């Protein structure tokens, strides 16, 4: 473990300082003899540290994609637009095709996949993202109850397939990982010769959670843009060193989608008639028609008003003449009535209604007062339709009257 720790420190330091990794930067290897994503046999030269997924960049121009599509865009109707949006541009409809859909529920590997390694990938019922089965690196020979083996070098490869005429191509998959961090890893990559693959490697644990990942085939490390290639391959690999094993690497719900020009070309209107934009009706202010009545059984003051669309809430202020403090209540903006049960027979109560947006007051009603009568007394804690507010009263001075 002393040598392995030293290797991890050296490589992590190289990553942090931007120094090219010896044995990884610019290297191509045969996946049938070593790790097809750039690691040396045993996996000990590619500790990926605590990172969830590490891109193995092989080439000096990291982040720059040569040959990327730069002379068009996809419009709001899903069509590829040639040029940069100049008037009277030509449109080409786009069609997206699922070239590969693997859920491991049918025959595996069948004629779809080419397998390498022993043990290697197999369809198992240990875990699954969808359905009852998934792909496990080791599933060809190992039981679900066990761990993966030491010194594994397993791969499953699909291809070749054509990307001639493609405007986009994406490989997506779900993964579930439980591997020795930094030493045992799952890789997903692409190739133009079926031998040298470039892409992503992942190590560590996903804590029992299936995670979705993707690989944009127009932006592959070293190979860069694969769109337009007549022969493209994708691979899933798993490598382990000579010690320490866990449950392993699982994958499921693999999809390869390719977008190409296709379908019927839409009819273009050279000089389209612009339909005038209809102006929505102005927002109306709630609180118009504010009125008050009383009820004797049970004793209450009833307030009603017309609704509106300009406000999202109201303040309702109640005051008395018997020395009690004013009560401020906040009501929802859709409210059009309020019943105050917290009243005493023969005492006067006065109310102000103020529509508002957030804490901004829009207007204020005329003050209305009522003298509820009768023999019933309401509970002092009963308030219907709103909530009492404590603290500083808002400033109602200078507000326009509700019209």
Image (cartoon, rainbow, N blue to C red):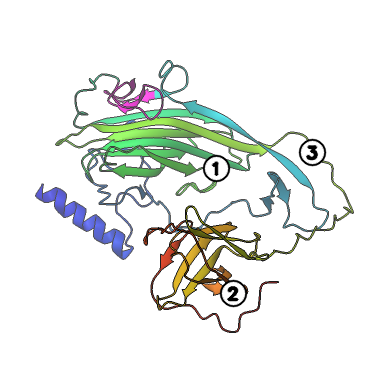
- Of residues 133 and 14, which is closer to you in this image? 133
Q: In this view, does 12 lie to the left or right of 403?
A: left
Q: Which mark is residue 226?
A: 1
Q: Which of marks 1 and 2 is nearer the N terminus?
A: 1
**Residue 311: x, y in percent?**
60, 65
Judged from the image, the secondary structure of the residue bearing numbered disc 1 is: loop
Q: Is the magenta stretch mostly helix, strand or loop?
A: loop
The answer to whether residue 45 of the structure is visible from this angle is yes
The residue at 76%/60% (across/down) is 281
Q: Which residue lies furthest to the bottom in this view?
A: 398
Q: What is the C-alpha distance between the residues marked 3 and 2?
A: 66 Å
| Residue on which disc 2 sits | 367
Q: Which mark is residue 290?
A: none
Question: Relative to 155, is 299 above or below?
Answer: below
Q: Pointer 2: residues within 10 angstroms few (<14), some, or many (20+)?
A: some
Q: Is residue 187 magenta?
A: no
| Residue on which disc 3 sits | 265
Question: Relative to 69, is 362 above or below?
Answer: below
Judged from the image, the secondary structure of the residue bearing numbered disc 3 is: loop
Magenta residues span: 115-139
**Residue 202: x, y in percent?**
32, 43
């Amino acid at each position: 473990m002393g040598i392995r720790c030293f290797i991890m420190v050296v490589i992590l330091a190289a990553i942090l300082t931007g120094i090219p990794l010896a044995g990884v930067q610019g290297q191509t290897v045969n996946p049938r003899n070593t790790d097809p994503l750039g690691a040396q046999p045993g996996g000990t030269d590619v500790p990926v540290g605590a990172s969830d997924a590490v891109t193995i960049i092989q080439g000096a121009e990291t982040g720059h994609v040569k040959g990327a599509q730069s002379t068009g865009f996809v419009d709001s109707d899903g069509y590829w637009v040639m040029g940069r949006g100049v008037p009277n541009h030509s449109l080409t409809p786009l069609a997206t095709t699922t070239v590969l859909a693997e859920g491991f529920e049918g025959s595996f590997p069948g004629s779809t996949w080419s397998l390498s390694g022993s043990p290697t990938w197999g369809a198992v019922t240990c875990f699954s993202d969808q359905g009852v089965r998934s792909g496990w690196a080791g599933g060809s020979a190992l039981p679900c109850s066990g761990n993966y083996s030491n010194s594994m070098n397993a791969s499953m490869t699909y291809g070749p397939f054509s990307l001639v005429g493609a405007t986009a191509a994406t490989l997506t998959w779900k993964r579930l990982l439980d591997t020795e961090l930094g030493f045992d890893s799952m890789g997903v990559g692409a190739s133009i010769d079926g031998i040298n693959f470039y892409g992503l490697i992942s190590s560590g644990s996903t804590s029992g959670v299936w995670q979705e990942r993707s690989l944009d085939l127009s932006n592959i490390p070293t190979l860069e843009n694969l769109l337009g290639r007549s022969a493209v391959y994708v691979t899933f690999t798993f490598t382990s060193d000579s010690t320490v094993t866990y449950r392993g690497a699982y994958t499921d719900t693999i999809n390869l989608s390719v977008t190409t020009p296709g379908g019927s070309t839409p009819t273009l209107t050279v000089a389209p008639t612009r339909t005038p934009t209809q102006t929505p009706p102005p927002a109306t202010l709630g609180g118009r028609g504010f009125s008050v009545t009383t009820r004797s059984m049970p004793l209450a003051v009833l307030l009603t008003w017309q609704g509106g669309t300009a406000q999202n809430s109201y303040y309702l202020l109640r005051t008395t003449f018997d020395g009690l403090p004013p009560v401020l209540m906040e009501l929802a903006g859709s409210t059009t009535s309020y019943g105050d049960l917290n009243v005493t027979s023969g005492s006067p109560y006065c109310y102000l209604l103020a529509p508002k947006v957030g804490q901004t007051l829009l207007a204020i009603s005329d003050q209305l007062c009522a003298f509820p009568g009768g023999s019933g007394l309401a509970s002092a804690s009963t308030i219907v339709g709103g909530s009492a507010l404590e603290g500083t009263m808002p400033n109602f001075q200078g507000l326009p009257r509700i019209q």
